[in-house]
Image: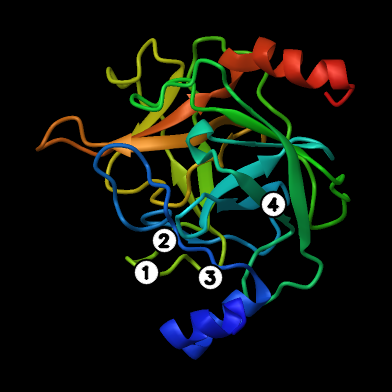
Amino acid sequence: MSHCSSVAQQDSDLTMFINCKLPTLTLVLTLCGQVHSGGIIGGHEAKPHSRPYMALLELKVPDKPDGHCGGFLLNEDFVMTAAHCQAESYKVFLGLHSYFDVNGIQELPVGKTFPHKDYDGKHYKNDIMLLQLSSKAKFNEHVKPIALAAEDNGHLPKLCSVSGWGKINDEHVSLKLLELNVTLTNNSHCAGEKLYCSEGPTGPGKGDSGGPLVCEDGKAYGLVSCSKKPDPDGSMVYRYTKIPEYKEWLDNIMKPKGKF
């Protein structure tokens, strides 16, 4: 029996349609700590293909269902995501907005992975990873790279947003790309940790890990790492790996290959 047929028997006709178009995307990777179960909580549908750098990653992990994370395209050879999205193998989908419109989607394998050497999976420190594509991404109207913020001058960007296809309930991912504006805060739980933070009832959710934190100049300043509630009566804190803190690490990987 085919993979799509077996999935269809376990779920609805709608899910069968989705999974015959794209691989099964059952979430197995979560944000750290206590998490919301929805993707981009409080968000709304993005304008189709207004974020052409967005990537959806399918993760293959031995003896577990396929999982997925977000990511974003840096150039024709590299995608950035979170280190906690590590898997045995990957497929990268570019040019995707809705599962119902998959024409022109680029499905690319990953040749090499570069999780940060000091990644701490217990505390989600240095939660950043590069994926080198086996085949080059082809740029077009729906597939374009995003520039990275190069410097950290100590001031928080004012207007930022996150996006992703995270879970909208306990069983299903969002069928369309969602987005949400977030306000960064000087949170004590992030100070000195190479992190940006936002707080409140809205933010990235389960399955949005690895997606970009994009700020007012259109550059990626961070990537979605994890969320947790440090105090029982406090607000949820959403953490984003601060990309400018890793410029030397990025240069060491990308520049020798002539890809930066």
Query: What is the quadrant of residue 115 in the picture?
Result: top right
The tag earlier along the polypeptide, 3 or 2, is 2
Which residue was labeled with disc 1? 171
Disc 3 vs disc 4: which is toward the camera? Answer: 4
- Disc 4 and disc 2: Cα gap in Å? 18 Å
Q: Name the residue at 59% across, 80% down.
A: 4
Three-letter amino acid code at the position of disc 2: Lys
The disc label shown at residue 167, or none: 2
Disc 2 vs disc 1: which is toward the camera? Answer: 1
Quarter of the image for the C terminus: give it: top right
- Disc 3 and disc 4: Cα gap in Å? 17 Å
Residue 2 is situated, as x and y percent measured from the top left of the image, at 62, 81
The tag earlier along the polypeptide, 4 or 1, is 4
Query: Label 2 crowding class (10 Å Cα cut-off): few <14, some 14-19, many 20+?
Result: many
Kindly indicate whether the residue at mark 1 contacts the one at mark 4 (C-beta within 8 angstroms): no
Disc 4 vs disc 2: which is toward the camera? Answer: 4
Kindly indicate whether the residue at mark 1 contacts the one at mark 2 (C-beta within 8 angstroms): yes
Query: Label 3 crowding class (10 Å Cα cut-off): few <14, some 14-19, many 20+?
Result: some
Mark 2 secondary-structure assignment: loop
Relative horizontal placement of residue 211, taking residue 111 as reference (left or right): left
Kindly indicate whether the residue at mark 1 contacts the one at mark 3 (C-beta within 8 angstroms): no
